[in-house]
Image: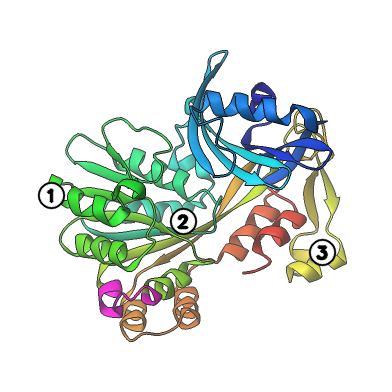
């Protein structure tokens, strides 16, 4: 099962017991795909085996548990996070696959447009300030953070991260695993980190007022700080920080930039073909048909599991602080005003970047609509 999930490039394997079946589904490029349906009678044995591998209590079936499995398949070393959850028909088990052999991602390989990449690379070499990466769960924020740290990591600077969990281990960087159950929260970890004389800090996620305050304080006292937030777009990050109780003048004086991102599925290169864009699609995408007369799509082949897609590419929106935007933030302006000002100053939105990726044949109209509908 693990080998099959690896062949499909899955990010997660779900073991889901129903009344009569045990369904095994994988998340491939962000979409769930069922790969096996087994009789329900083997569920107990499968659950026990997975819990043993993850060093969990096999007798405890009433409470959720978390663990890790290290597994070797051929030359590949898999690190899997295991989560169990009691359900009506038995325990639901989800394995998040972290393929250690596939960790080296460069900023150039993420799919950032050249102008955004150039701006972003300039920002991340600033001596101090805060850079936020935003987007929903599973939008590639952690990958962007790791690629950023790989880019700026050098022997002349000390980099410390506090994460929950530490997904990939990076050379030359001190990584701390947050653990709320023993009192080591992001805020607690951060307090200790600043006493370790770092130059660059990476906080896995800003979840509360305390963490936000320490992060901003660190950015204002000469550290370069990277972190993530769950928001729909770049401008929404400012509102989220204000909702957490952070003063506008602190946000405006510490922030360097906010990078919002999403992931769209990439057209499979083995079976790609071209077709005309339909009138209905142009109307839904809110574009002129003549601006994109032809679009790429995948016919479906063995390589992509008949889906027509293989791999994903990022969509990006980079909001860089300017005097006007800082003034809006300091005076408590809402996200719409900040977004409009950024667009006026040349920011390309996630939707615009998605349409560029569509025109260059990287993705399909269906994907653009699926991922950017709410924007």
Say which residue label 3 marks. 281
What is the crowding at mark 3: few (fewer than 14 residues within 10 Å), some, or many (at least 20)? some
Q: Residue at x 40, y 76 (%)?
A: 243
Earlier sequence position, callout 2 versus callout 1:
2
**In the image, is 49 to the left or to the right of 298?**
left
Q: Residue at x 74, y 71 (%)?
A: 286
Q: CA distance from mark 2 to mark 3?
A: 28 Å
Tell whether position 318 is magenta: no
Earlier sequence position, callout 2 versus callout 3:
2
Q: Residue at x 31, y 49 (%)?
A: 202
Select label 2 or label 1 by which is in front: 1
On residue 195, the disc is 1
From where the camera sits, is residue 37 visible? no
> Which image quarter is the N terminus in?
top right
Q: CA distance from mark 2 to mark 1?
A: 37 Å
Q: Disc 2 vs disc 1: Cβ atoms closer than 8 Å?
A: no
Helix, strand or loop at label 1? It is: helix
What is the crowding at mark 2: few (fewer than 14 residues within 10 Å), some, or many (at least 20)? few
| Image: 60 above or below 351 | above
Q: Which residues are magenta?
A: 242-252
């Amino acid at each position: 099962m693990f080998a099959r999930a690896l062949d499909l490039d899955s990010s997660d394997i779900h073991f889901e017991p129903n009344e009569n079946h045990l369904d095994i589904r994988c998340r491939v490029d962000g979409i769930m795909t069922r790969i096996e349906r087994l009789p329900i009678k083997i569920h107990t044995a499968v659950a026990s085996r997975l819990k043993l591998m993850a060093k969990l209590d096999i007798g405890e079936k009433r409470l959720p548990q978390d663990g890790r499995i290290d597994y070797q398949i051929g030359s590949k070393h898999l690190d899997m996070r295991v989560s169990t959850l009691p359900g009506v028909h038995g325990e639901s088990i989800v394995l998040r696959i972290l393929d250690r052999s596939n960790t080296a991602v460069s900023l150039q390989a993420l799919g950032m447009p050249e102008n955004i990449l150039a701006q972003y690379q300039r920002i991340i070499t600033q001596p101090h300030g805060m850079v936020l990466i935003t987007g929903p769960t599973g939008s590639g924020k952690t990958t962007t953070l790791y690629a950023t740290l790989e880019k700026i990591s050098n022997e002349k600077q000390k980099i410390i991260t506090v994460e929950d969990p530490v997904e990939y281990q990076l050379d030359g960087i001190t990584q701390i695993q947050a653990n709320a159950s023993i009192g080591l929260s992001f805020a607690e970890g951060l307090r200790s980190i600043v006493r370790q004389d770092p130059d660059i800090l990476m906080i896995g996620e800003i979840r509360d007022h305390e963490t936000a305050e320490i992060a901003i304080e660190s950015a204002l006292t000469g550290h370069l700080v990277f972190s993530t937030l769950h928001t729909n777009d770049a401008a929404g990050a400012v509102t989220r920080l204000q909702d957490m109780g952070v003063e506008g003048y602190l946000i405006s004086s510490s922030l360097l930039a906010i990078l919002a991102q999403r992931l769209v599925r990439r057209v499979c290169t083995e079976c790609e073909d071209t077709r005309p864009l339909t009138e209905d699609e142009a109307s839904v995408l809110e574009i002129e048909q003549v601006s994109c007369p032809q679009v790429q799509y995948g016919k479906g082949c063995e390589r992509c599991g008949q889906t027509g897609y293989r791999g994903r590419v990022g969509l990006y929106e980079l909001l860089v602080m300017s005097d006007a935007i800082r003034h809006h933030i300091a005076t408590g302006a809402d996200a719409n005003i900040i977004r409009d000002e950024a667009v006026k100053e040349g920011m390309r939105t996630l939707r615009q970047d998605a349409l560029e990726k569509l025109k260059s044949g990287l993705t399909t109209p269906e994907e653009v609509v699926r991922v950017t509908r709410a924007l």
